[in-house]
Amino acid sequence: MNTIEISVLSPRAALSAFADTWHEGEASREPVSKLAFGSLRELFELGLLDRADDGVLSAPDDEILIHAGIRDAA
């Protein structure tokens, strides 16, 4: 299954997540594709999903996991 993990993170949290991912690679664990955004607005402006003329949504990945705090939506 092709999965991408998306997070909305502060700059400090993004650096920490980068370090964690780096260590996963050093430990020879297969990394998951990851993206991080500074806000929900940035996330939803990216165009991760495509909508066909018949209204069907499609994405380049089989599964999209989004981690974002509700407070970030304000």
Image (cartoon, rainbow, N blue to C red):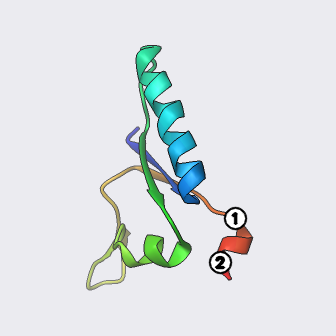
Looking at the picture, how far across and down is residue 15, in whole percent? 51, 45
**Quadrant of the snapshot with the C terminus:** bottom right
Spatial CA distance of label 1 from label 2 is 7 Å
Looking at the picture, how far across and down is residue 30, in whole percent? 42, 23
56 and 5: which one is in front?
5
The number of callouts visible is 2
Task: Examine the rendered structure and indicate whether residue 43 appears above or below residue 7.
Answer: below
Q: Which mark is residue 73?
A: 2
28 sits to left or right of 65: left
- Tell me what residue is drawn at x 47 percent, y 40 percent: 18
Task: Examine the rendered structure and indicate whether residue 55 appears above or below residue 69.
Answer: below
In the picture as drawn, the residue positioned furthest to the left comes out as 53
Looking at the picture, how far across and down is residue 54, in whole percent? 30, 84
Q: Which mark is residue 69?
A: 1
Task: Examine the rendered structure and indicate whether residue 55 appears above or below residue 22.
Answer: below
Examine the image and state in which quarter residue 52 appears: bottom left
11 and 1: which one is in front?
11
- Tell me what residue is drawn at x 58 percent, y 60 percent: 10
Examine the image and state in which quarter residue 45 appears: bottom left
41 sits to left or right of 71: left
- Tell me what residue is drawn at x 60 percent, y 50 percent: 13
Amino acid type at circle 2 is Ala
Q: Is the Cβ of the residue at disc 1 closer than 8 Å to that at disc 2?
A: yes
**Quadrant of the snapshot with the N terminus:** top left
